[in-house]
Image: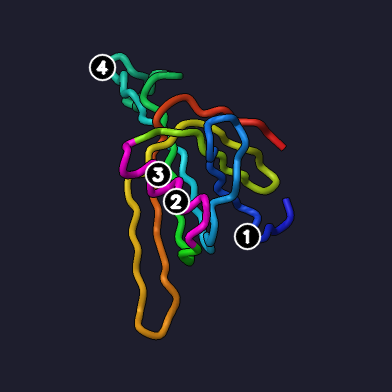
Amino acid sequence: MAAQNGKDLLLKLDLTGDGQFETVAGLRATRVSFNAESVDVTSLESGGGWRELLSGAGVKSASISGSGIFKDSDTDLRARQVFFDGLTPDFQVIIPDFGTVTGPFQITSLEYAGSHNGEATYEIALASAGVMDFVAL
């Protein structure tokens, strides 16, 4: 796989619930993480004393974080609404040369900052809230 532009890792939000996704405005950095808890089934009978894990068990989760400049666009307004209303709309993450992940997320953190002689910035963190759909590129 060739090197990829970081700007090609996109976070999109379903603005109206109709499946039409729009890129979250102003993001400069985005990070996505996938996790799966393991279920340890090691016993005295485990070969050589090696740990054994139960295949397919455990909780799967995804988290997304991003930071950027505050642009006060439709996606900023929707993100604030989603956070304050505790909603879990569909988001879409486009990962270059990997695929697209779509599913419900809850915004767990929304932070705004700014300095006297600089732009207003924000940071956002999301946690998966249901089944994720993955489509490979």
Which callout, 4 or 3, points to the residue nearer the camera? 3
Residue carrying label 1 = 7
Q: Identify residue for label 4.
A: 44
x and y, in percent, of residue 65 in the image: 43, 51
Q: Residue pushed farthest left? A: 44
Q: Residue at x 44, y 51 (%)?
A: 77
The amino acid sitting under disc 1 is Lys
The nearer-to-camera label among 2 and 4 is 2
Q: Residues within 10 Å of mark 4 (few under 14, many from 20)?
A: few
Q: Quadrant of residue 92?
A: top right
Type of the residue with mark 3: Leu
Q: Callout 4, which amino acid?
A: Leu
- Badge 1: residue crowd in 10 Å (few <14, some 14–19, many ≥20): few
Range of magenta residues: 72-86
Mark 2 lies on residue: 77
Callout 2, which amino acid? Leu
* Residues at marks 1 and 2 touching, judged by CB atoms closer than 8 Å: no
Q: Give the mark toward the camera: 2 or 3.
A: 2
Measured as percent of width and height from the top left, residue 48 is found at 35, 24
Label 1, secondary structure: give it.
helix
Residue drawn where x is 47% and y is 24% of the image: 131
User: In the rendered image of this protein, does residue 76 appear above or below residue 82?
Assistant: below
